Image: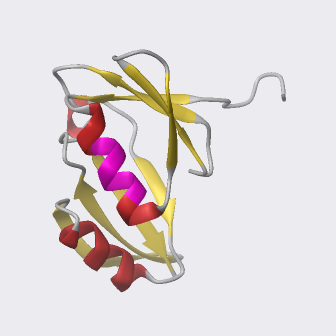
Amino acid sequence: MQTNKINYVELPARDLALNKAFFRQVFGWGFKDYGPDYTAFENAGLDGGFFRADFCSRPQNGAALVILFSDALEAARDKVAFAGGIIEQEIFEFPGGRRFHFLDPCGNEWAVWGR
């Protein structure tokens, strides 16, 4: 483990089972449960987990935006929508690439970028 480096991120989820199913289907993540109110995600590129909460993580509320990378941006957007995610912002260009924003089934905002 590296000292003074980001090591773990935790995000809220109203329904752990629903979020686990979504991220497993869309991004191929695995999960390890730690009791009924917490699940750690695996194979997500960064260690972290979801904790049961009645609120969600949105940048407009002061939360950090977690951004994933995809080599197939349009396919990622389509998988998100098919699995029940809400496309919050369609694909747009920015210096260095393109990205879209979506809400997971619990209302957390994420982004996916690609080239």
Q: Which image quadrant for residue 98?
A: bottom left
Instruction: Residue at 26%, 79% (x, y): give it.
Output: 78
Instruction: Residue at 20%, 28% (x, y): give it.
Output: 14
Q: Give the x, y percent position of residue 62.
A: 29, 29
Q: Give the x, y percent position of residue 101.
A: 28, 61
Is the residue 50 above or below the residue 82 in the image? above
Q: Give the x, y percent position of residue 50.
A: 39, 30
Way the structure is coloured: secondary structure
On the question of residue 59 being in view, the answer is: no
Is the residue 48 above or below the residue 36 in the image? below
Q: Nearer the viewer, residue 33 or 41?
A: 33
Q: Is residue 89 magenta?
A: no
Instruction: Residue at 19%, 39% (x, y): give it.
Output: 106
Instruction: Residue at 29%, 21% (x, y): give it.
Output: 52
Q: Which image quadrant for residue 26?
A: bottom left
Tell which residue pokes out farthest to the right in this image.
2
Main SS of the magenta part reads helix
Is the residue 67 above or below the residue 17 in the image? below
Q: Nearer the viewer, residue 48 or 98?
A: 48
Is the residue 14 above or below the residue 37 in the image? below
**Is 3 situated left or right of 53 in this image?**
right
The image shows a total of numbered marks equal to: 0
**Is 112 situated left or right of 59 in this image?**
right
Q: Which residues are magenta?
A: 19-24
Q: Give the x, y percent position of residue 7.
A: 67, 30
Q: Nearer the viewer, residue 30 or 56?
A: 30
Q: Which image quadrant for residue 59?
A: top left
